[in-house]
């Protein structure tokens, strides 16, 4: 929703994640706010927009009862969503205890492609701070 080439996007766009849904809004030239709520069925944690591919990438968490001990089982995902229809184009489930911590869109020198770069960390129950982190790059 923001980019280094167009910092005004931050002022003209809004994304709000709350339990089970994502709300995305834009403000047009006459200052009218357009909002659309997208039911996800999971908790959005991080979001990035890529104008070139017309997609959003989100890091999200889904909680479901495990049954055996009564605790909720937590699964984290990286989802690629089309920015007009909000249809999920692609989805990757992260490893157990792996959480999506950051996501940005970027490009590299001498490469015309745009990439989503995701930072993750393993939050093991016996550790007070994550001891293992990963960096993922996707076209």
Image: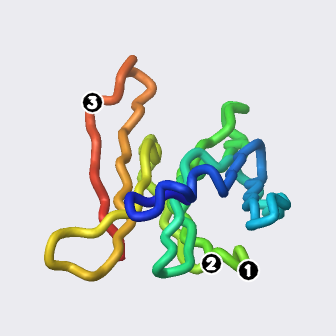
Image location (x, y in percent) of residue 120? 37, 46
Q: Quadrant of the C terminus?
A: bottom left
Q: Residue at x 68, y 52 (%)?
A: 15
Give neighbour class at mark 2: few <14, some 14-19, many 20+ (Cα, 10 Å): some
Give neighbour class at mark 3: few <14, some 14-19, many 20+ (Cα, 10 Å): few
In the drawing, what numbered circle is on residue 85? 1
Judged from the image, the secondary structure of the residue bearing numbered disc 1 is loop
Extreme-left residue of the structure: 110
Near-viewer residue (137 or 95): 137
Image location (x, y in percent) of residue 91? 54, 70
Label count reads: 3
Image location (x, y in percent) of residue 69? 67, 31
Near-viewer residue (72 or 134): 134
Near-viewer residue (110 or 23): 110
Judged from the image, the secondary structure of the residue bearing numbered disc 3 is loop
Give neighbour class at mark 1: few <14, some 14-19, many 20+ (Cα, 10 Å): few
Q: Is residue 114 left or right of residue 75?
A: left
* Residue for badge 2: 82
- Spatial separation of the CA atoms under disc 2 and disc 1: 6 Å
In the drawing, what numbered circle is on residue 131? 3
- Spatial separation of the CA atoms under disc 3 and disc 1: 38 Å
Judged from the image, the secondary structure of the residue bearing numbered disc 2 is strand
Vertical placement of residue 77 versus 134, above or below: below
């Amino acid at each position: 929703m923001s980019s280094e080439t167009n910092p005004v996007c931050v002022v003209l766009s809004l994304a709000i994640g709350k339990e089970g849904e994502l709300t995305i809004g834009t403000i047009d030239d006459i200052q009218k706010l357009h909002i659309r709520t997208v039911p996800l069925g999971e908790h959005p944690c991080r979001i990035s927009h890529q104008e070139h591919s017309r997609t959003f990438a989100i890091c999200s968490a889904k909680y479901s009862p495990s049954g055996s001990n009564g605790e909720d089982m937590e699964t984290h995902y990286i989802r690629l969503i089309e920015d007009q229809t909000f249809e999920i184009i692609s989805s990757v489930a992260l490893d157990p205890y792996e959480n999506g911590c950051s996501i940005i869109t970027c490009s590299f020198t001498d490469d015309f492609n745009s990439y989503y770069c995701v930072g993750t960390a393993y939050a093991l129950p016996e550790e007070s701070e994550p001891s293992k982190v990963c960096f993922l790059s996707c076209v």
